[in-house]
Amino acid sequence: MSLGHYDLVGTTIYEAEDLPQDLIADEHHIMVKGEKRYVATTVASGCFLGMAVCEGADEASLISVYLCFKDEALLVKPDYEPRRVNTD
């Protein structure tokens, strides 16, 4: 199955002005082949905009996967800066 695009942000947001100003970022643990992993998600307006898996919940691991959303958002709008990001 394919989303038809190489990144999640570009698949869900077509116009730069549609990028949300307020985001929610959260991570959840999952099991992958018996090993604990974390899925970092970026959500806004009821839509997943970013999702990436990492091995740890430490700051360096989470920053690296949240950068996936940032990189994809900057492809849509090079000067994108959200107004607020709500985290737990």
Image (tube, rainbow, N blue to C red):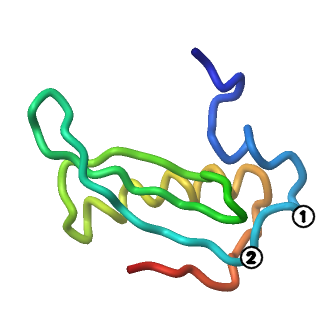
78 in relation to 79, above or below: above
Residue drawn where x is 21% and y is 46% of the image: 37
Say the numbered circle drawn on residue 57: none
Density class for disc 2 (Cα within 10 Å; few <14, some 14-19, many ≥20) is some
Q: Residue at x 63, y 49 (%)?
A: 72
Identify the residue at horizontal 62%, vertical 19% (top origin).
2
Please tell me how many numbered marks the rendered image carries: 2
Quarter placement of the C terminus: bottom left
Residue located beneath label 2 in the image: 21
Q: Residues within 10 Å of mark 1 (few under 14, many from 20)?
A: few
Q: Nearer the viewer, residue 75 or 48?
A: 48
Mark 2 secondary-structure assignment: loop
Q: Is residue 22 left or right of residue 26?
A: right
Residue lying at the far left of the rendered structure = 34
Residue that numbered label 1 is attached to: 17
The residues tagged by marks 2 and 1 sit, at their Cα atoms, a distance apart of 10 Å
In the image, residue 19 lies at what x, y percent?
Answer: 79, 63
Up-down relation of residue 41 to residue 34 (above or below): below
Residues marked 2 and 1 touching at CB (< 8 Å): no
Give the image location of residue 26, x and y in percent: 41, 66
Q: Amino acid at mark 1?
A: Glu
Left or right side of 3 for 87: left
Amino acid, disc 2: Gln
Residue 86 lies, in percent from the top left, at: 52, 81
Q: Is residue 38 left or right of residue 47?
A: left
Instruction: Identify the residue at the far bottom of this view.
Output: 84
Q: Residue at (20%, 33%) from the top-left corner? A: 32
In the image, residue 65 sits, relative to residue 3, either above or below, namely below
